[in-house]
Amino acid sequence: MRTVPIQLPETVFSALRKNPEEFIQEMRIAAAVKWYELGDISQAKAA
């Protein structure tokens, strides 16, 4: 698996009321849903 580092201000987590681990999990799900919506990946890969 490849790691992609991104820099975010600490205020992102407090604004969303999420800790970094929750934020990362939600970002993974959001990316999979979006790629599936665009037809870039299959439903199986998105799951």
Image (cartoon, helix red, strand yellow):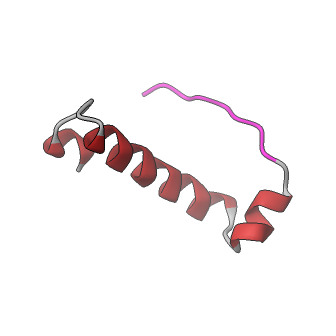
Please determine whether, in this image, residue 35 is positioned above or below residue 12.
above
- Magenta stretch secondary structure, dominant: loop
Q: Residue at x 74, y 63 (%)?
A: 13
Please determine whether, in this image, residue 35 is positioned above or below residue 3.
below
Please determine whether, in this image, residue 11 is positioned above or below residue 27.
below
Frontmost residue, 28 versus 37:
37
Residue at the bottom extreme? 17
Q: Residue at x 40, y 53 (%)?
A: 29
Image quarter in which the N terminus is found: top left
Count of marks placed on residues: 0
Position of residue 34 in the picture relative to residue 43 (left or right): right
Task: Give the extent of the magenta segment.
Answer: 1-8
Position of residue 34 in the picture relative to residue 25 (left or right): left
Frontmost residue, 4 versus 42:
42
Residue at the top extreme? 2
Q: Residue at x 27, y 30 (%)?
A: 40
Residue at the front extreme? 38
Q: Residue at x 48, y 25 (%)?
A: 2
Position of residue 13 in the picture relative to residue 34 (left or right): right
* Residue 5 in magenta stretch: yes
Task: Give the image quarter of residue 23.
Answer: bottom right
* x then y, percent, for residue 27: 52, 51
* Residue 13 in magenta stretch: no
* x then y, percent, for residue 32: 35, 45
* x then y, percent, for residue 33: 33, 49
* x then y, percent, for residue 35: 33, 38
